[in-house]
Image (cartoon, rainbow, N blue to C red):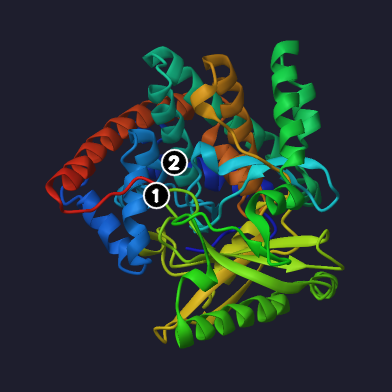
Amino acid sequence: MTATGQGGSDLTVAERTTRGRAARSATPRSGHARFVPAGQRQDPVGILERQAVTRVPELVPIRYGRMLESPFRFFRGAAAIMAADLGQAPHTGITAQLCGDAHLLNYGLFASPERHLVFDINDFDETLPGPFEWDIKRLAASFAVAGRANGLDDRQRATVVKKAVRAYRERMQLFSGMRTLDIWYAQDDADQLNAMLPDAKTRRRTSRAMAKARTRDSLQAFDKLTHVVDGVRRIAPDPPLITPIDDLSPGTEREELEQSLRALIERYGRSLSTECRHLLGHFHLVDMARKVVGVGSVGTRCWIALMQGRDDGDPLLLQAKEAGESVLAPHCGPSRYDNQGKRVVAGQRLMQANSDIFLGWERVTGLDGRPRDFYVRQLRDWKGTPRPETMPPGMLRLYAGMCGGSLARAHARSADPVAIAAYLGTGGSFDRALAEFAEAYADQNERDFEVFAEAARTGRITAEAA
């Protein structure tokens, strides 16, 4: 599948509208309410085990341990399982650049290059072109799963999910009538979003979260993650979550690993724009460490690089994360890019209104002789991470609307907003269908969680807390 942007077709607006409405015949909007597991549905534990084959063996138990904490944490790491389920179901055939893992924790606050605080999707490890509704289904199901964890009742959960889907649908309607450049320049400025909130208490709470996000920058990460050893700045160990390179491999292996990582940082600059490559050149590499990140990503190779500019008070922290094949690839076809790091970067730049100026990619050869693809970005450049487990129903509903609207903006940059808006329509048919789907998939997620927990109890998999 390939993304079909609004500027990539000679069809008129009327023809694009007809195309969107015609998709209802093959895939009725009400049909999305159903989730019926495929007759030959893949074993969920087997899917996770296949992912583990290419990961760092000693870190895989940490991934499993985090997924065992709750059905919601399991859902976060189960993007490949849901992709397999969606790949077996009918779809609209209307393609967008997908996030691939659009659950509610993959949105947040971060800094734009102009130093504005913006709200957007912030995880693109699985990005690939595919049916636009797959991202919405992942998002909707995540709110249903989170709502259960929060103790919301059936009606409250349905209201939250429908808010997310309605926000997507209504914003896509707006984009369908906008000029192409206006869509491209659209962004979700956090201050403007906060001003639109319905009451003073919610605005104060959100303002506090925004203020905290502005403090979570490179200097804060620098103070938290580094210390001085014998007069030299080093990344502080916190094994197994943060392991400096000196503690990983002794002797010749350590030297080879360091050379490989130095080459990664030095060469990745070629993927940046000319001015950002020049800016990167003002920093030199001081130290490196392996870092465990997230839930679903645990076990992939992830490195943090401490860079220094004019002196010890001028740091830059970069994160180099291994990029494998997207979980969508078996169902949507392989990426057009031969480097998986470039796939992630290209998808992120296409979907995000503002991307990190240090976002780039490179390929290096590992100690095992295998080529490995990485993408690189700043470790932290302002960061606000949502905490849905602390959100009351009203706040969760507002957050759902923010996520749904942001996803619509991300899709409208690569897809045909006219066709998508025509398919979705102005009524609530699609909203209601996705609310039913989300509950059905939350049921499936709980069944998969129990199968996963049984695998841990019987010793099929090994899980560790960290």
Q: Amino acid at mark 1?
A: Ala
Residue at mark 1? 79
Find out whether the residues at labels 1 and 2 contact each other: C-beta distance under 8 Å: yes
**Residue 138 circle label:** 2
Image check: 290 left or right of 296? right
Q: Find residue 418 and report its horizontal and vertical position in percent.
A: 63, 44
- Which residue is drawn at the image coordinates 53% and 22% (left, top)? 390
Q: Is residue 98 above or below residue 188?
A: below
Image check: 86 left or right of 262? left
- Which residue is drawn at the image coordinates 64% and 47% (left, top)? 410
Q: Find residue 437 and report its horizontal and vertical position in percent.
A: 36, 31
Look at discs 1 and 2 and give the one toward the viewer.
1
SS category of the residue bearing label 1: helix
Splitting the image into 4 quarters, where does residue 155 fall? top left
Q: Is residue 181 above or below residue 284?
A: above
Q: Is residue 365 above or below residue 235?
A: below
| Nearer to me, 84 or 25 | 84
Q: Amino acid at mark 2?
A: Arg
Q: Find residue 222 and report its horizontal and vertical position in percent.
A: 71, 54
